[in-house]
Image: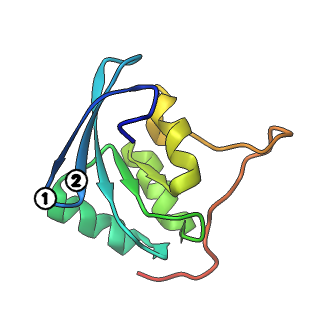
Amino acid sequence: MINHGNCVSLDRRDDLVFEFIRKQQNDRLTVVCLNEYTMGLTAVQRVIHEFGKPSIIYIGGGWCGYTEQAKNFCLMERIGLYVTNEMPGALWSTEYWSYCQRDKDGNPISHLSSRYQT
C-alpha cells in the first residue's frame, strides 16, 4: 500500500495495525489487516475491543467476505470494511468508510458472504 498514489507514509504497529497518511485528504487512517474468510459482527466488535476503533478493517483476499450485519454496523460507525479489491478505491475516497466498488456498468460489487459466522 505504500505504493498507492494517495499514500504519503505508512507506519506499522502491533503487527496488524497500519497508519496511512493520505495526500489528497491530508488525514491519517488506521487500518487493521486480517485474514478472515467471513467477517461477522462479533469479529468486528473484537477488533474494536482489541485495537480501538479503526478507520478501516481490511479482511484479506477477494475470496473473503463479510456479513451484512458486519457491513451495516461498520457503515453506521464510519468504519470501512473491505476485501483486497476494494482497498485502492477506499484509500482514494474522502468518505473511505462508505466506498463501494463498481463493475464496468456502474453496478455495485458486493462481497457479502452467505456464510454467517460470529
Element at label 1: loop
Q: Are marks 2 and 1 in contact (CB under 8 Å)?
A: yes
Residue at screen point 46% across, 64% down: 60
Residue farthest along the front direction in this orientation: 3
Q: Nearer the viewer, residue 11 or 118?
A: 11
Q: Nearer the viewer, residue 92 or 94?
A: 92
Residue 64 at x, y = what percent? 54, 70
Residue ID for mark 1: 14
Left or right for 86, reference 94:
right
Mark 2 residue type? Val
Residue ID for mark 2: 17
Residue 44 at x, y = what percent? 34, 65
Mark 1 residue type? Asp
Quick one: label 1, few (<14), some, or many (20+) residues within 10 Å? few
Q: Quadrant of the C terminus?
A: bottom left
Q: Exactly how many numbered labels are in the figure?
A: 2
Element at label 2: strand
Quick one: label 2, few (<14), some, or many (20+) residues within 10 Å? some
- How does the figure colour the protein chain or chains? rainbow
Left or right for 61, reference 32:
right
Residue at screen point 64% across, 78% down: 114
Residue at screen point 50% across, 58% down: 71
Left or right for 107, reference 95:
right
